[in-house]
Amino acid sequence: QVQLVESGGGLVQAGGSLRLSCTASGLPFGNRAMGWFRQAPGKEREGVSCISSVRQYTSYVDSVKGRFTISRDNAKNTLYLQMNSLKPEDTAMYYCAARNTFAFGACTFDDYNYWGQGTQVTVSS
């Protein structure tokens, strides 16, 4: 059974930083593309950043480029999202997701097969 467990969310002031982690089990983590998604109240879930498995190619939504960094440690089955210069509009539930292939695809909701329960990020102004 695939399990994805996120941690690291919380309340932070604008301009602050947070580091999200996602620990995976039940799948060959090193051979699977991974992604971070977020969903704010009343909005659709959007792809924030995705990363391929071995070569670790990355993609970012325009609104977080230069502020967020996705990374992975395949030896630890863990995915990370370093979030700097946080803005109130980054407030959302953040989800970790896994795809049944090595490439990250279009980094959209429909591309990903397994999901964590989410961790809340709240940025105050």
Image: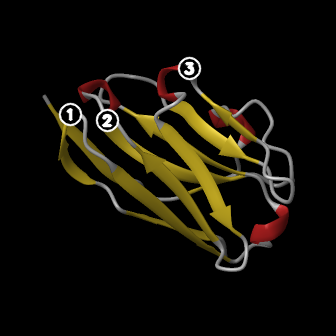
Q: Residue at x 79, y 44 (%)?
A: 57
Which residue is painted at 54% across and 28% down in the image?
A: 65
Using the rendered view, name the quadrant where residue 43 is placed. Answer: top left
- Distance of mark 1 from mark 2, alpha carbons? 5 Å
Which residue matches tag 3?
A: 62
What amino acid is found at the position of numbered circle 2 in the picture? Leu
Helix or strand or loop: what does disc 2 sit on?
loop
Label 1 to label 3: alpha-carbon separation: 19 Å
1 or 3: tag closer to the N-terminus: 1
Q: Residue 35: which numbered mark, if any?
A: none
Is residue 6 rendered to the left or right of residue 35? left
Q: Are marks 1 and 2 in contact (CB under 8 Å)?
A: yes
Residue 31 x/y as whole percent:
85, 64
Q: The N terminus appears in which quarter of the rendering?
A: bottom right
Residue 42, relative to residue 50: is it above or below? above
Q: Residues within 10 Å of mark 1 (few under 14, many from 20)?
A: some
- Tell me which numbered mark, 2 or 3, is placed earlier along the sequence: 3
Q: Which residue is mark 1?
A: 14
Q: Amino acid at mark 1?
A: Ala
Residue identifier under label 2: 86
For label 3, the crowd category at 10 Å Cα-Cα, with few meaning under 14, some 14 to 19 and many 20 or more, is: few
What kind of element bears circle 1? loop
Q: Residue at x 76, y 53 (%)?
A: 33
Judge left or right: residue 108 versus residue 14: right
Residue 123: where, in percent of width, then height? 21, 37
Query: Quick one: SS at disc 3?
Result: helix
User: Would you identify the image quadrant in which residue 112 lies?
Assistant: top right
Q: Position of residue 25 (x, y in %)?
A: 64, 77
